[in-house]
Amino acid sequence: MKHAQTYQLTVNEMNEFLEQLSKKYDIYAPVRISCGGRYAKDDSIIYQPINTYQEIEFHERSTYPLKEVLTPITQTLFYFTEDEFKESKSPQKDVLIFGRACDINSIKIQDQIYLQNGGIEDYFYKRIRDKIKFILMDCPEQFEGCFCCSVGANKTDMQSLAVSDNNGSAYVGIYDSDFNNYFAKYSAVDHEIQTPLENELKVDYPVIDNLDLANKLKEHPMWKEFDARCIGCGSCTVSCSTCTCFETTDIVYTQNAHIGERRRTCSSCMVDGFDKVAGGQSFRKKTSEKYRYKILHKVYGYNARFHTGPMCVGCGRCSARCPELISYPATLNKLSQAIKEIKGGVQHD
Amino acid sequence: MTNNPVKPTACKLLDIMPQTQTEWTFRVKNNLPIKHGQFMQLSLPKVGEAPISISGFGDGYVDFTIRKVGKVTDGLFSLKKGDNIFIRGCYGNGWPTEQFKNKTVVIIAGGTGVSPVKSLVNMLCEHSNYARNIYLILGFKNSHSILFADELKKWQTASHFHVIYTLDDENYPGFKKGLVTDFIKEIPFASFDNEYECIIVGPPIMMKFVGMGLLMNKVPEKKIWMSFERKMSCGIGKCGHCRIDETYVCLDGPVFNYTIGKKLID
Ligand SMILES: Cc1cc2nc3c(=O)[nH]c(=O)nc-3n(C[C@H](O)[C@H](O)[C@H](O)COP(=O)(O)OP(=O)(O)OC[C@H]3O[C@@H](n4cnc5c(N)ncnc54)[C@H](O)[C@@H]3O)c2cc1C
Ligand code: SF4
Ligand code: SF4
Ligand code: FES
């Protein structure tokens, strides 16, 4: 990370700063929602608009990923009448998002699909993406299951600002000259905001360099156990920073009205119906086949198409969210083992 | 930023031509350029969208031949001439038509699989000098499921066409009883001097067995072309439904050469 001009602000000064920013920007950050979690008395931490510094949750991983600011779980694309489809309203203000290095890096993967794939830009993604600037949060305390360093997602240069929470004050680093004038009245301090250099959990992220190997891995017995373990709930993909799949559905307000809306809803290759075609045929019926499809996309398919590395930023949310305690890093280790076996010529029947 | 690739436009429904009880051809006003074998997304506001192959096109119109199977397709069947239908596209690569020039083209299609290849067959029929000659094997379940009866007659009488029409389990004039796979052996591949290409379209299981049949007749893999059907929502490489490893059927297909198609394992 290039060394930035850094300032130290009190909480009140941060709130003043945020208030000034809010004239131009909608500001999003991970926010704790009390009792909003899966189980009673369980909190959930989600990306929401904020007004004050104190609303930001610095000390725990957000339950749901940053992508939700760009691609909400449900989003209205069009309003339609008998003879016209009209796009939903564009965001008015620019957008500032607080995110950790992995979270910000995940947007490169979202960009790859929504803006690059097939040379076609998705209108709804692009219209908000163009308005976004990032505020990097450092990670002095890492969380259980983080492995950003194993996939190179621990560093970023996409931030306009960086913020480090320092018990009652905040360090703010400036990377984008657009923000310089907010700090004219402060004097710089000698402090460098760091992102993680090492994680406790180290994952040897598998490399599958050709389709023949990927196809051989589809036959490997390593997937079988997931028929019994995985319930195909899709929690792992909904909480994943880098998954992008969606469904498109129409809704009407009243039974006989000719007006309604077309929505885009977060979807998952882990749930039944994702691949179902006319005649009710599915291509991946067993849960083990769905899980294998998901894992091989992250390890093989994405990189084989775009040549930009894994479709994963090591945020650890998938494992944290799995109700069946399935560990994604453990799966990756098994996959590395299976690759060794196949390359070494071990046969399975 | 004006172009929105998933925004459907209203187009007039010019005509409805029933083929069977559950398969109708919808003729829709259109002026966009189309390649044989492409598809479009048809929308019915309130109900949703469905990807449908282009079964024909001409000056100012495009045809879709649709099987009534569920929500959107049921809704389309309740439309009347003059109503609006919403479309976006075209999508997909289409058939490698250039590759067929001056060669023998073998086309084996089953059921609604005839749709995505129909405009190509018509072109090859009308331009008798485009390809050297055509071997056409088309299969349907029974006499009630025969599609494009008028065109079948036209193709049968074209002098550069050799046709075999089949019904799975019924004796019926003009049709042989049996599966399309039973008749592959009647195609004189050895007489084509290697100057030929094969096309397969139909349900996945039919394509699998026809593919095997062609290979058994020593057809090289690279001469075989297939059109894939996968679940699709966006048609533009975003929603993920049609993806198989690094391949997006909506962007890179739906037409694949056998050498690539055989490696697409869902
Ligand atoms: C490239 C392509 C070309 C096609 N061409 C034709 C054609 O020329 N004529 C034709 O009749 N049909 C064609 N289909 C199939 C057609 O898209 C489906 O029959 C249609 O989407 C079903 O929609 P529905 O709302 O009526 O059915 P639903 O009520 O949604 O469901 C009925 C069945 O269709 C399946 N289905 C739903 N959406 C899709 C989808 N997007 N793709 C595939 N299956 C789906 C459902 O899983 C279910 O089994 C094509 C599909 C593809 C991918
Ligand atoms: S696969 Fe798991 S660790 Fe990787 S980006 Fe998705 S949720 Fe995070
Ligand atoms: S969260 Fe766990 S149980 Fe649910 S689909 Fe993912 S791996 Fe399977
Ligand atoms: S149909 Fe959406 S990615 Fe292909």
Image (cartoon, coloured by chain):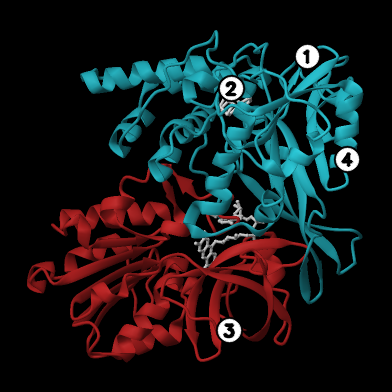
Chain colours: A cyan, B red
Amino acid type, label 2: Cys
The chain holding disc 4 is A
Instruction: Name the residue carrying label 2.
Output: A230
| Frontmost residue, B139 versus B127 | B127
Q: Which mark is residue A290?
A: none
Q: Which residue is mark 1?
A: A166
Whether labels 3 and 4 share one chain: no
Q: Position of residue A147 (x, y in %)?
A: 54, 17
From the viewer's perspective, tell me whether residue A198 is left or right of residue A183.
left
Q: Residues within 10 Å of mark 4 (few under 14, many from 20)?
A: few
Q: Residues within 10 Å of mark 2 (few under 14, many from 20)?
A: some
- Tell me which numbered mark, 4 or 1, is placed earlier along the sequence: 4
Q: Is residue B134 left or right of residue A164?
A: left
How packed is label 3: few (under 14 Cα within 10 Å), some, or many (20 or more)? some
The residue carrying mark 3 is B30
Which one is nearer the viewer's eye here, B24 or A307? A307
In three-dimensional space, the C-alpha distance between marks 3 and 4, rounded to whole angstroms, equals 52 Å
The residue under the point 86% across, 35% down is A18
Q: Are marks 2 and 3 in contact (CB under 8 Å)?
A: no
